Image (cartoon, rainbow, N blue to C red):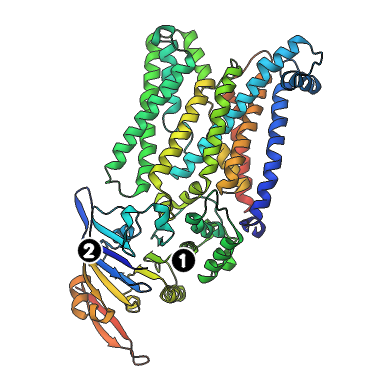
Amino acid sequence: MKLTAEQLGWSVHGRTLLEDVFLDVAPGQTFGLIGPNGSGKTTLLRLLAGLNKPKKGHVRIDGQPLAKMRQRHIAQSVALVEQQAETTDRIYVREVVALGRTPFLSALRPWSTHDDAIVDQALDDVDMTHMAGRLWHTLSGGERQRVHIARALAQQPKILLLDEPTNHLDIRHQLSILELVRQLPITVVISLHDLNQAMECDRIGVMDGGRLIASGQPHDVLTAQRLQETFGVHAHVLDDPIDGKRIMRFRSAI
Amino acid sequence: MKAIAMHSTPMARTQAHWLWLAPLVLLIALLAGTAIGETSIPVDTILKVLANHLLGANYAVDRIDAGIIWNYRLSRAIVAACCGAALALAGVVLQALLRNPLADPYLMGISAGASTGAVAVTVAGLGAGAFTLSAGAFAGAGLAFGLVVLLAHAASSGTGGGRSNQAAGAIILAGIAGSQLFNALTAFIITKSASAEQARGIMFWLLGNLSGVRWSDVAIAFPAALGGLLICLWHRRALDAFTFGADSAASMGISVRPTRGLLIIAVALVTAIMVSIVGAIGFVGLVIPHAMRFIVGTQHTRLVPASALAGAVFLIGSDILSRTLVPGQVLPIGVITSLIGAPAFALILVRGTRTR
């Protein structure tokens, strides 16, 4: 599904958190969202997921404005993995993943073996099948993150939005989640802090002060000058002699 | 542990199990509530009286026994069941929606408002005898709830309608403010104009009193409890979806504001009805949902019917004890619910955490 935003704006208490954002993500593309703390990445993802109605502009999926769609209808196409979603309930991992089927269930459409199969697959995708019977509060932060991703996958979304999903994960699971996300045949918008990981996206956008100040191919966007201006670091861009990929080495904060 | 966890499919089986058991347990509790009292009445006499009234049979039964059973104890047991079920459901819903384990049916100022309404009618003489205590309590509960909702709305719209989790916090704080205000009003009216005798009567009523209950109360309590149960069952998946907060529920397709508004208004209404009939019985709405989460898990498909059943049976049992514990005297039922409930809950809490 194609995801677009036009002239998107959002503010709270008269403080502008997002201004004039234009975004265009082609079907199947993985779009990386980067930017310093407080630059508006989370706010943008919330608007894209339909959690907040934009104060200015529109979000559209396949040309249809989100603001005019019912929440349930949105959730049948768009899934969001929030940064911190916690519970004190004594809930089992499998039950959490099963929540992802909510937008498809109703009094007339009860839980079925089809839903079970989808939940099994989602657990397998994030390598959590062996923990399906564990209680939520016994999981580590990284395991919880993987369960949330499985829950989003159980929605079988056509657009997947992830807010810093690799936080808390060990390096192996960071790479496997990113690999999984990139291989999904769906549209993905993912906010990331690790700029080298962002280089693996099809396209990236840089947020600063609530604006999308640049977007395009990773190596066009992430130049040494950009790193200095937006992220406040001195960095080199190197070529990895093994596979020729570009990597960044950050030397010092400005 | 695995066996418990894999319930997406076995759930259907456990569910069927419950459905068979629930009416049976409830029926036994109702029979016990009718049989046990200052004068014990044998079960066969009860069955004969029921047959006379319900099936038009013509068994010869002692007229006094028949009167006690039909006019006094049975209606009382049914109202106790309805009230227990409704309060437990209100607790389930508020704890799920507000993400706060301390949420109970009186959180929204309902019991405080009801007591103000009750003393306004009985002590201050508001309405000059045109209102009953129940009507006054209901009006007071409604007024307090309305005020709390307005306050919560004003407080949460101050955040720009932004993160919906903040709205839950605003509701809780508004409820505390509203409760304090109405409790103060009640105290003010009592100290200003009540005699010691009246104050004691109000105190007794506030702790829960099923003594005056008749069939006309059943006609109000039963539809209210049933309506509450059906609304909760209909929204069981929405209640599940709130596990990780309102934003997460929204991202899974729940229209948070309308759903939360409907459910909170529904349980507030049902609670206000129960409070106006029997007073503010504590503990049931707070603790039964937690106890049931330990036993049947957090999924509302099971939690909702289980809590309704447990609340109903628990309150019938408490009522029996309140009538029999001290011979010749009826204790306020709220005293019993807390005296029995608190240790029982402590046991579940300790054992529940140890076994997992």
- A139 and A164: which one is in front? A164
**Image quarter of the C terminus of chain A:** bottom left
Element under disc 2: strand
Q: Where residue A61 sits: x, y (%)?
A: 34, 63
Q: Is residue A191 left or right of residue B196?
A: left
At label 2, which amino acid type do we have? Val
Element under disc 1: helix
Label pair 2/1, CB-CB below 8 angstroms = no
User: Label 1: how many residues lie within 10 Å, few (<14), some (14-19) or many (20+)?
Assistant: some
Q: Where residue B138 sits: x, y (%)?
A: 45, 22
- A141 and B129: which one is in front? B129
**Image quarter of the N terminus of chain A:** bottom left
Q: Name the residue under label 1.
A: A142
Q: Is residue B64 left or right of residue A12?
A: right
Q: In which quarter of the image is residue B349?
A: top right
Label of residue B23 in the image = none
- A102 and B318: which one is in front? A102
Q: Where residue B306 sits: x, y (%)?
A: 62, 41
Q: What subunit carries mark 1? A: A
Q: Mark 2 points at which residue?
A: A21
Question: Which numbered disc, 2 or 1, marks the residue closer to the eye?
Answer: 2
Inspect this view and state whether residue B21 appears.
yes
Question: Are discs 2 and 1 both within one chain?
Answer: yes
Residue that appears at 42% across and 12% down: B121
Q: What subunit carries mark 2? A: A
Q: Height in image: A54 above or below B280? A: below
